[in-house]
Image: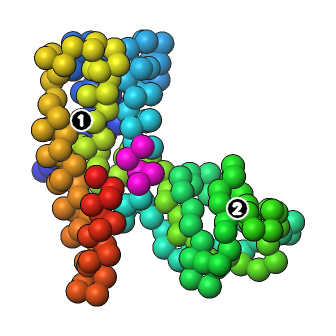
Amino acid sequence: MAGLTPLTELEAINEILATGSDSPISTLEENTVIDASLAMNTLRATSVEVQTRGWNFNTEDSLKITPDQEGAIRLPRNTLKVDTVGESAGINGVQRGLRLYNKTDKTYTFASPVTVDLVLGLDFEELPSTARLYITIRAARKYQDRYFGDQSTHSYTSQDELTAQSVMMAEELESTDPNMLTGSQFNQDLRSRG
């Protein structure tokens, strides 16, 4: 028995195309169709925008990264945001390309491992269903605004977007299991993402 499955990237792109009454595509390789290309680019840019805020599903906390033989801290290719934490919190480290840069010492060279929190950009199919839905609705609204401009013809309303966002935020709250000690700070962080 086959059940319902989360929205795929192809389905999300076709949903965006449908908001403009454009024909659906059957594969992501059909990038010669300009509308499909615009829809795909809008979806992917919106996914990066939403994921950059950092959620439980795409954040690696207190990850210790050891410098390579040249002393460089190499970040994963899909790093969206990095923050030095724990014993490394005193290092003013920022992401520059795929390396960590020490702003205080003005160098890319580190003598010992550095502990960081990483926000990673995940492929659409790696996201939770609630994030996929929110990103799709947000991208569809952006697509409509950019390429059609008529607010009265929106297939999705701002209320649809807010509803999808609140469902995603509720899932975020559930997945982090905040307690009385961390809940207050967590709730402030969560509100700042909205």
Position of residue 176 relative to residue 144, above or below, is below
| 20 left or right, relative to 47 | left
Residue 33: image quadrant is: top left
According to the image, label 2 marks what residue?
100
| 83 left or right, relative to 193 | right
User: Residue 97, image x and y in percent?
Assistant: 69, 49
According to the image, label 1 marks what residue?
137
- Residue 106 visible in the snapshot: yes
Q: CB under 8 Å between callouts 2 and 1?
A: no
Give me the residue at 71% from left, 57% from top. Answer: 99
- Residue 23 visible in the snapshot: no
Measure how far apart labels 2 and 1 are at the Cα level. 34 Å
Residue 106: image quadrant is: bottom right
Query: Which of the two discs, 2 and 1, sits closer to the camera?
Result: 2
User: Residue 152, image x and y in percent?
Assistant: 13, 17
User: Residue 121, image x and y in percent?
Assistant: 48, 51
What secondary structure is the stretch in magenta mostly built from?
helix
User: Residue 191, image x and y in percent?
Assistant: 27, 60
Q: Secondary structure at mark 1?
A: helix
Q: Secondary structure at mark 2?
A: strand
What amino acid is found at the position of numbered circle 1 in the picture?
Answer: Ile
| 163 left or right, relative to 33 | left
What amino acid is found at the position of numbered circle 2 in the picture?
Answer: Leu
Give me the residue at 27% from left, 20% from top. Answer: 144
The stretch in magenta equals 49-53
Could you say which is closer to the camera, residue 183 or residue 139? 183
